[in-house]
Image (cartoon, helix red, strand yellow):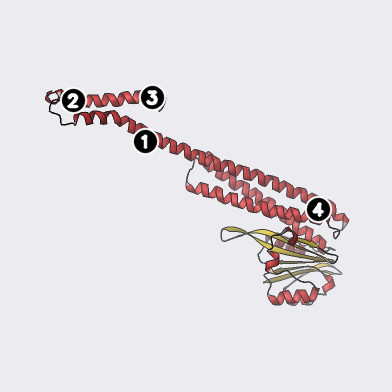
């Protein structure tokens, strides 16, 4: 559990950690309160001190678009899913935002690099002024920057998988599983980024944000659009890789089947000859002939060689 806040003073913005420190800060001076894994007591304290109603876990996880952004005359409420990586697995978890006057309250259950980076910037660089609106947009800007890095790393993983498939011609099952995992991760990224794009578009339409922030918001929408375009490109690459893998597997299976077919046909004439001379008829001219055995062997060799020659002439081998 962690509680962090940024508040205004005569010498600039300062930070406080934990409920005890936050309790001693005047509510009207606070511009950002961030809660990580808050307890029931923490939530009750924040609701009482700042006169807000926090989201429940169920409300934060609602998938309806109407529950992702709501604006009233008093405040803005928003929920946004963030991608996290834990124990080798990727997933999404909601983060709640409440913007009331000049105060931003964020509530989350996972550690996020974007929040850590913004909190660090407030600790190390004493800004003279800011508001909850500024912090909200800074958090979204930082997420866009981090997601751009994430997308770049994802592209590198796709390239590495492509190299294994097209250059090294590795047709192991692990390659197909890796492609499937990358597809799922790309879809997860696209869903969360599309959700962020809708949220930023809603902010642009809102009358709650200062007009001088609109140019910045428009640039953020363009940046998110660029991320989505690159995501669509990555998804097409993965579909191409998947089709390439399946095509190479089909070619390999056809090659194996072809080999078995050639071997089968190659031994058919000798088998026929052996079957003929394996019959127990009393009147077979070659049975009493001293050269019958070598003749049968020679006939088998010639029939197989003739079959092999015919296959090569037809370019089937």
Look at 30% across and 27% down and name the residue there.
Answer: 304
Residue 159's spot in the image, x, y percent? 59, 44
Labelled disc at residue 312: 3
Q: Earlier in the sequence, mark 4 or mark 1?
A: 4
Q: Nearest the camera: 34 or 271?
A: 271
Q: Earlier in the sequence, mark 3 or mark 4?
A: 4
Snapshot quadrant of residue 125: bottom right
Q: Earlier in the sequence, mark 3 or mark 2?
A: 2
Q: How many marks?
A: 4
Snapshot quadrant of residue 240: top right
Residue 268's spot in the image, x, y percent? 30, 30
Q: Nearest the camera: 239 or 158?
A: 239
The residue identified by callout 4 is 217
Q: Secondary structure at mark 2?
A: helix
Look at 70% across and 69% down and name the residue there.
Answer: 56
One can see residue 140 in this view: yes
Q: Secondary structure at mark 1?
A: helix
Mark 1, other Cα within 10 Å: few <14 / some 14–19 / many ≥20: few
Q: Earlier in the sequence, mark 2 or mark 4?
A: 4
The residue identified by callout 1 is 260
The residue identified by callout 2 is 294
Mark 1 and mark 3: span between their CA atoms?
Answer: 16 Å
Q: Are marks 2 and 4 in contact (CB under 8 Å)?
A: no
Mark 2 and mark 4: span between their CA atoms?
Answer: 92 Å
Residue 177's spot in the image, x, y percent? 52, 50
Look at 22% across and 31% down and name the residue there.
Answer: 275
One can see residue 145 in this view: no
Q: Secondary structure at mark 4?
A: helix
In the picture, measured across the screen, residue 315 lies left or right of residue 269, that is right
Mark 2, other Cα within 10 Å: few <14 / some 14–19 / many ≥20: few
């Amino acid at each position: 559990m962690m509680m962090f806040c940024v508040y205004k003073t005569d010498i600039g913005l300062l930070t406080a950690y934990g409920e005890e420190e936050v309790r001693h800060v005047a509510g009207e001076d606070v511009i950002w309160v961030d809660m990580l894994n808050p307890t029931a007591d923490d939530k009750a304290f924040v609701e009482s001190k700042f006169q807000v109603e926090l989201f429940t876990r169920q409300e934060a996880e609602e998938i309806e678009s109407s529950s992702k952004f709501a604006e009233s005359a008093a405040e803005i409420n928003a929920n946004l899913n963030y991608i996290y990586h834990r124990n080798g697995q990727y997933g999404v978890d909601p983060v709640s935002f409440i913007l009331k006057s000049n105060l931003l309250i964020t509530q989350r259950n996972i550690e996020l690099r974007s929040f850590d980076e913004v909190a660090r910037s407030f600790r190390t660089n004493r800004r003279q002024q800011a508001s909850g609106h500024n912090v909200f947009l800074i958090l979204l800007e930082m997420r866009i920057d981090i997601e751009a890095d994430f997308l770049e790393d994802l592209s590198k993983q796709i390239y590495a998988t492509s190299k294994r498939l097209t250059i090294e011609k590795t047709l192991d099952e692990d390659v197909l599983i890796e492609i499937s995992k990358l597809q799922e991760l790309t879809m997860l990224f696209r869903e969360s980024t599309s959700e962020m794009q809708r949220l930023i578009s809603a902010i642009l339409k809102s009358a709650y944000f200062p007009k001088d922030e609109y140019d910045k918001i428009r640039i953020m929408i363009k940046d998110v659009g660029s991320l989505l375009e690159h995501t669509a490109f990555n998804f097409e690459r993965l579909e191409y890789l998947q089709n390439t893998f399946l095509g190479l597997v089909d070619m390999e299976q056809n090659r194996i089947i072809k080999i078995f077919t050639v071997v089968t046909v190659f031994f058919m004439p000798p088998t026929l000859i052996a079957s003929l001379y394996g019959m127990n008829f009393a009147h077979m001219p070659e049975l009493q002939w001293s050269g019958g055995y070598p003749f049968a062997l020679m006939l088998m060799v010639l029939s197989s060689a003739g079959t092999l020659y015919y296959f090569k002439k037809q370019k089937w081998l």
